[in-house]
Amino acid sequence: SFSDSAEPKKLQLTLAILKPDVASRPHIVEDIHDIIQENGFFFVATKHLHLRRADAEEFYKEHHGKFFHNRLVNFMSSGHIWAHILAREDAIAHWRKIMGPTKVFRTIHSDPHTIRGRFGLTDTRNVCHGSDSPKNALKEIAFFFPEFNAEKWYREDEPYYHPENVSFCSESLAHIPVKSSDKKN
Ligand SMILES: Nc1nc2c(ncn2[C@@H]2O[C@H](COP(=O)(O)OP(=O)(O)OP(=O)(O)O)[C@@H](O)[C@H]2O)c(=O)[nH]1
Ligand SMILES: Nc1ncnc2c1ncn2[C@@H]1O[C@H](COP(=O)(O)OP(=O)(O)O)[C@@H](O)[C@H]1O
Ligand SMILES: [Mg+2]
């Protein structure tokens, strides 16, 4: 018989980046990490790294030829960044919503309470990135976390991502699922 109990919606994954303009300001990084948690996201994985110019070129190849492409690639390889795999119901749309619109010079006035409205400097130094579709999220996650297996995560870990089932490791900036087998009785 079909169970008519509504299946809890699966968590969605997205790739978030904190860009060099904020990565060099630790207090703002902390504020944004707090905002992410306050918005019900789980940190699945985190990396703190410095893109080489060629890597930034590859990551933003969809914008090749646009007037801002050169400044974007130079900027993204100009300092350290934080890359996060975030999980939440409708993670992709919700992260883009709290990031705010791309062009900071407008966003400061139109959406002052968003992350970009609060911490953005210019259209290039606009604080953060978020995947814009499920397909791009998987591609961008693979770009920064080639060792991450999404199918395995959905099969083995996703069911444990409930606030009472995870412990947050501030060292690795990740929520670790406490599986019943390792639960200390
Ligand atoms: N159409 C067009 N717009 C431009 C061009 N250069 C800059 N802009 C716009 O001018 C504004 C300034 O661009 P930004 O690069 O974000 O800001 P910036 O003052 O150069 O500061 P940086 O963060 O150092 O790049 C943005 O709204 C851009 O969209 C251009 O060559 N053509
Ligand atoms: N008009 C612009 N001026 C300067 N930089 C821009 C502009 N439009 C986009 N960019 C840069 O390219 C990145 C990717 O652009 P896009 O994918 O359109 O925005 P988003 O990052 O919000 O998804 C932006 O985050 C920003 O850094
Ligand atoms: Mg984009």
Image (cartoon, grey):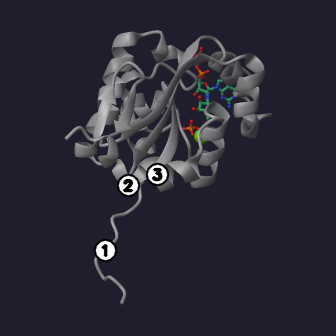
Q: Residue at x 70, y 25 (%)?
A: 56
Mark 1 crowdedness (10 Å alpha carbons): few <14, some 14-19, many ≥20: few
From this view, report whether residue 144 is shown above or below residue 164: above
In x, y percent, where is residue 175? 36, 34
Q: Is 140 on the left-hand or right-hand side of 110?
A: right
Quadrant field for ligand 2: top right
Sequence order check, earlier mark of 3 and 1: 1
The circle drawn on residue 6 is 1
For label 3, the residue is: 156
Query: The residue under label 2 is which amino acid type?
Result: Pro
Residue in front for this viewpoint, 55 or 154:
154
For label 2, the residue is: 159
Q: Is residue 18 visible from the viewing direction of this image?
A: no
Residue in front for this viewpoint, 41 or 164:
164
- In this rendering, the count of numbered labels is 3
Q: Secondary structure at mark 3?
A: helix
Q: Secondary structure at mark 2?
A: helix
Sequence order check, earlier mark of 2 and 1: 1
